[in-house]
Image (tube, grey):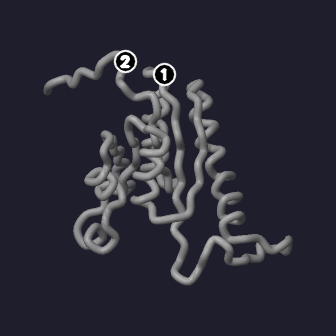
Amino acid sequence: MTDIAIPHRAPWKTMLVPTDFSSGSRAALSLAADLAKVHGARLVVLHVAELLPGLTADTVVHAEGGGAPMRLEDFHRAQTLAWMEQDRALAHTRDVPVELVFVLGAVVSVVLAEAAQRHADVIVMGTHGRSGLAHLVMGSVAERVLRQSPVPVLTVRVPDAT
């Protein structure tokens, strides 16, 4: 087995970490936080939400248990950022600067646009490791990002629990 040498100072100063809150995304974030600590990089943790057909960011929703009606984008942002605070906590345990970003849109195009806008040096993302019919039907976000990204993409796969 050949060891792969990674330069002491990788050129990665900004690492984009898309998350869907899966175990693969959590593993990717953990690895990215470790790499960011070693290389003095900052993390941009991104969650992209795609709306169902017929819905818009301005669709009004009513929260369970009452409360004032809210725009769908505002409701989704509040819910998502609460989940993402766990991501911030993980990065802070490693003393790594982290920015949380929530965007409504098509996942692949938003990930690529955010990478460009934030001058990301690398994208670190989890993969579900689907194969066969599941891969054919659902496709792979990680694969599409990998094929289209102008910057390196590091994918992290967590083996199935079965």
The residue lying at 29 percent from left, 53 percent from top is: 148
Give above or below for 30 relative to 49: above
- Residue denoted by label 1: 40
Q: Is residue 131 left or right of residue 83?
A: left
The x, y position of residue 26, in whole percent, is 49, 45
Q: Residue furthest bottom?
A: 54
**In the rendering, at what x and y percent does residue 146 appear?**
29, 50
- Label 1 crowding class (10 Å Cα cut-off): few <14, some 14-19, many 20+? some
Image quarter hosting the N terminus:
top left
For the residues labelled 1 and 2, the Cα–Cα distance comes to 9 Å
Quadrant where the C terminus sits is bottom left
- Residue positioned most to the right: 67
Q: At 53% across and 49% down in the image, what residue appears?
A: 46
Give the amino acid type for the residue marked by disc 2 in the picture: Arg
Amino acid on which disc 1 is placed: Gly
Numbered tag placed on residue 9 in the rendering = 2
**Element assignment for label 2:** loop
Q: Residue at x 49, y 32 (%)?
A: 33
Q: Is residue 1 left or right of residue 115?
A: left
Percent across and percent down for residue 152 are: 31, 40
Q: How many marks?
A: 2
Give x and y (percent) for residue 24.
Answer: 42, 50
Image quadrant of residue 63?
bottom right
Front residue of this view, candidates 70 and 117? 117
Mark 1 and mark 2 lie on one chain; the one further toward the N terminus is: 2
Q: Quadrant of residue 79?
A: bottom right
In this orientation, which residue lies closer to the viewer: 74 or 38?
A: 74
| Mark 1 secondary-structure assignment | loop
Asked if the residues shown at circle 1 and circle 2 are in contact, with their CB atoms under 8 angstroms apart, the answer is: yes
Q: Is residue 2 above or below residue 111?
A: above
> Is 78 positioned to the left or the right of 8 in the image?
right
Eyeballing the image, is 10 above or below 137? above
